[in-house]
C-alpha cells in the first residue's frame, strides 16, 4: 500500500514539475488565460489583461453570447514575441485549432502586439468546427466588429489611416479584387493578396452596417450556418453583386470628397502596408 502511495507521489511530482515551470509565464483573469514568451515586458502583459477583458466584454455585448464553452471556457492569449523570427520566417496573428489567440510584436514597441486582438477575439467567439464556413463573411465580420469596438485604426490594414483612404486607394488605382473572387477563392487569394483583401472587406462590411444597420449585419452573423450567397439577399435586400456595385460607388464618392485623397494614399502606401503581400494589378485568379 505504502509503496503504491510512494509511486503515486512520485508520479504527481513528475506531473507537477512542468506545470510549475510554465506557471511563471502565465496568468488568469475572469475570462482570459494569458501566456507570454520570456522577456515580454510587464506592461505588455498588463495591456493584454486590460485590452483582452475590454474586448471580451465588448464582443460579448455586440454578439449577445459567450465564446463556445467547449473550446474556450476562457480565452487564451499567447504573446509570442517578435513577428520576425530568428530563422527569417514571420508569425502572424491568428486563432489556432484549439481556439487560442496567437499575437506577435511587429513594431519596435509592445503596443504593436494588440492591433489584431479585437479581430481575433471575434474569431474565438465564433469558433465552431463547421466544415464549410464562409470565410469571406467571417473575416469581414471580424473587421466589422473590431472597427466598432476599437475605432483607433491602429495596425493592419489601416495603420492610422481612415478606412476610406485604405480601401479607396486600391479601387482608384485599379488594384482591387472583386468581392466575388475574395469570397469564392478565399484560400488562394486571402494571404497572397492580404493588403487588399482585409482593406476591401473591412470597408464593405462597414458600408453594410452604415446603410442597412449594424443589427442587420449582426442578424446574418447570428444564423446557424453562414455560407450560402442567398443569405446576402435575404438580409441586405440585394444579391452580393448588386451590393458590391452600390458599395463601390459609395466608396469612390467618399474617396473623391477627401482632402488631398491622393496625397493621403501615397502616405498610406509608405506605411507598414508596404511590407504586406499585395497582388499586382490585373492579376488573374
Ligand atoms: Zn481573421
Image (cartoon, grey):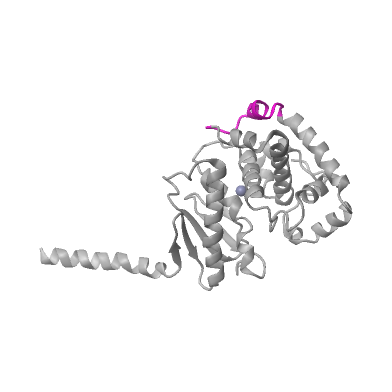
Q: In which quarter of the image is residue 19?
A: bottom left
Q: In which quarter of the image is residue 153?
A: bottom right
**212 on left or right of 225:** right
| Residue 129, percent from left and from top | 49, 40
In magenta segment, residue 248: no
Residue occupying the point 72% across, 57% down = 276
| Residue 263, percent from left and from top | 88, 57
| Residue 21, percent from left and from top | 39, 70
Against 181, residue 4 (above or below) is: below
Say if residue 40 shows up in the picture: no
Residue occupying the point 67% across, 67% down = 107
Q: In which quarter of the image is residue 260?
A: bottom right
**196 on left or right of 66:** right
| Residue 61, percent from left and from top | 54, 45
**163 on left or right of 36:** right
Q: Which of 39 and 53 is in front in this view?
A: 53
Residue occupying the point 42% across, 70% down = 24
**Stretch in magenta:** 224-239
Amino acid at each position: 500500500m505504502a509503496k503504491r502511495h510512494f509511486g503515486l507521489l512520485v508520479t504527481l511530482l513528475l506531473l507537477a514539475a512542468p506545470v510549475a515551470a510554465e506557471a511563471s509565464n502565465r496568468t488568469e483573469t475572469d475570462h482570459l488565460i494569458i501566456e507570454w514568451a520570456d522577456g515580454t515586458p510587464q506592461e505588455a502583459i498588463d495591456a493584454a489583461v486590460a485590452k483582452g477583458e475590454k474586448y471580451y466584454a465588448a464582443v460579448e455585448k455586440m454578439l449577445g453570447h459567450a465564446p463556445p464553452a467547449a473550446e474556450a471556457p476562457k480565452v487564451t492569449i499567447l504573446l509570442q514575441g517578435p513577428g520576425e523570427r530568428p530563422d527569417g520566417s514571420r508569425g502572424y496573428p491568428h486563432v489556432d485549432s484549439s481556439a487560442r489567440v496567437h499575437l506577435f510584436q511587429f513594431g519596435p514597441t509592445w503596443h504593436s502586439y494588440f492591433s489584431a486582438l479585437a479581430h481575433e477575439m471575434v474569431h474565438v467567439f465564433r469558433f465552431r468546427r463547421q466544415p464549410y464556413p464562409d470565410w469571406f463573411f467571417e473575416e469581414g465580420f471580424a473587421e466589422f466588429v473590431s472597427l466598432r469596438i476599437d475605432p483607433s485604426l491602429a495596425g493592419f490594414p489601416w495603420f492610422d489611416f481612415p478606412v476610406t483612404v485604405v480601401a479607396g486607394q486600391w479601387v482608384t488605382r485599379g488594384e482591387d479584387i472583386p468581392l466575388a473572387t475574395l469570397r469564392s477563392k478565399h484560400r488562394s487569394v486571402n494571404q497572397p493578396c492580404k493588403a487588399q483583401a482585409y482593406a476591401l472587406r473591412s470597408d464593405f462590411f462597414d458600408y453594410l452596417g452604415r446603410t442597412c444597420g449594424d443589427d442587420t449585419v449582426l442578424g446574418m452573423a447570428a444564423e446557424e450556418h453562414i455560407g450560402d450567397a442567398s443569405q446576402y439577399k435575404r438580409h441586405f435586400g440585394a444579391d452580393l453583386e448588386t451590393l458590391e456595385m452600390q458599395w463601390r460607388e459609395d466608396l469612390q464618392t467618399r474617396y473623391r470628397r477627401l482632402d488631398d485623397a491622393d496625397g493621403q494614399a501615397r502616405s498610406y502606401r509608405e506605411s507598414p502596408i508596404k511590407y504586406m503581400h499585395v497582388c499586382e494589378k490585373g492579376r488573374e485568379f
